[in-house]
Image: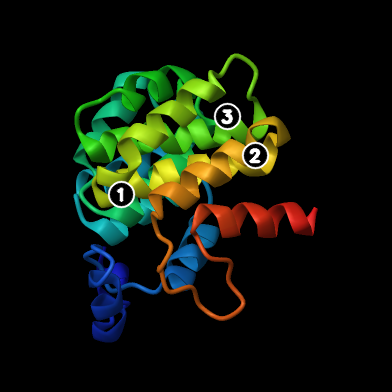
Amino acid sequence: MAELAGLEDAKTRAVNERHGDDHGVNLGRLRAIAKRLKTQQELARQLWETQDSAARLLSLLVCRPKAFGRDELDGMLRGARTPKVQDWLVDYVVKKSPHAEELRVAWFADPDPVVASAGWALTVERVAKKPEGLDLPGLLDAIESRMQDAPERLQWAMNHCLAQIGIEHAGYRARAIAIGERLGVLKDYPASPGCTSPYAPVWIAEMVRRR
């Protein structure tokens, strides 16, 4: 914790706070610490319990994803206060967990939009890697009816799912593009030079072109 406190940087914190995060540690330096520590599950749990965001991010880098129980992961997500911690928890831990599908189903329908966004993020993973058994038309129906008015994090996850369906599944591509065009979600989002716009019709077209 003392080492993490020593890495705190005011400029880094200011940038992170604009995105809803509350730490000032450079993520590259955080990864270097994790590389040195290697996997340490007990330390990971202790770091998580501090409730400090930088410590929690480090926790997620040194933990053993399959060692967490289903209810433990559910509680961790609900207690994760910031976007970066939530994203890393889903991407680095839950996706590697044997409980991923059970949590996906539970979180997908949760009334808390942050929890629901995690369910949609796991659904994006299914759309891309294991779509068998997914109701793709039903997902498109839900996106079409709910995405435009969804809270920001949930909207972002639903938009990612819309784009992923259009990219991966040619039979639903035209409908995915049409939904994106009609709703206009993230159409004016400022994309950095060299980066693809998150606006679904542009995103789909660019990824399909690359393939």
CA–CA distance in space, label 2 to label 3: 17 Å
Query: How many marks are shown on the rendered structure?
Result: 3
Query: Extreme top residue here?
Result: 133
Q: Amino acid at mark 3?
A: Arg
Residue 13 on image: x %, y %: 25, 76
Identify which residue, 176 or 91, lies in the foreground. Answer: 176
On screen, residue 144 versus residue 53, left or right, reads right
Q: Which residue is found at the position 28% from the left and 82% from the top?
A: 9
Which residue in the protein does label 3 denote?
126
User: Mark 1, residues whose alpha carbon is within 10 Å: few (<14), some, or many (≥20)?
Assistant: some
Give the amino acid at mark 1.
Answer: Arg
Residue 7: give x, y in percent of width and height: 32, 77
Please give the name of the residue rendered at 40% of the width and 60% of the height, measured from the top-left corner.
Answer: 186
The residue that disc 1 covers is 153
The location of residue 161, given as percent across then percent down, is 50, 40
In contact (CB < 8 Å): disc 2 and disc 3: no
Sequence-wise, which precedes: disc 1 or disc 3?
Answer: 3
Residue 106 is marked as: none
Relative to the observer, which residue lies in front, 166 or 87?
166
Q: Nearer the viewer, residue 144 or 27?
A: 144
Q: Which residue is mark 2?
A: 173
Crowd rating for badge 2 (residues with CA inside 10 Å; few <14, some 14–19, many 20+): many
Whether residue 140 is visible to the viewer of this picture, yes or no, is yes
Q: Quadrant of residue 170?
A: top right
Q: Report the mark closest to the observer, 1 or 2.
A: 2
How would you rate the neighbour count of disc 3 (Cα within 10 Å): few for under 14, some for 14-19, many for 20 or more?
some
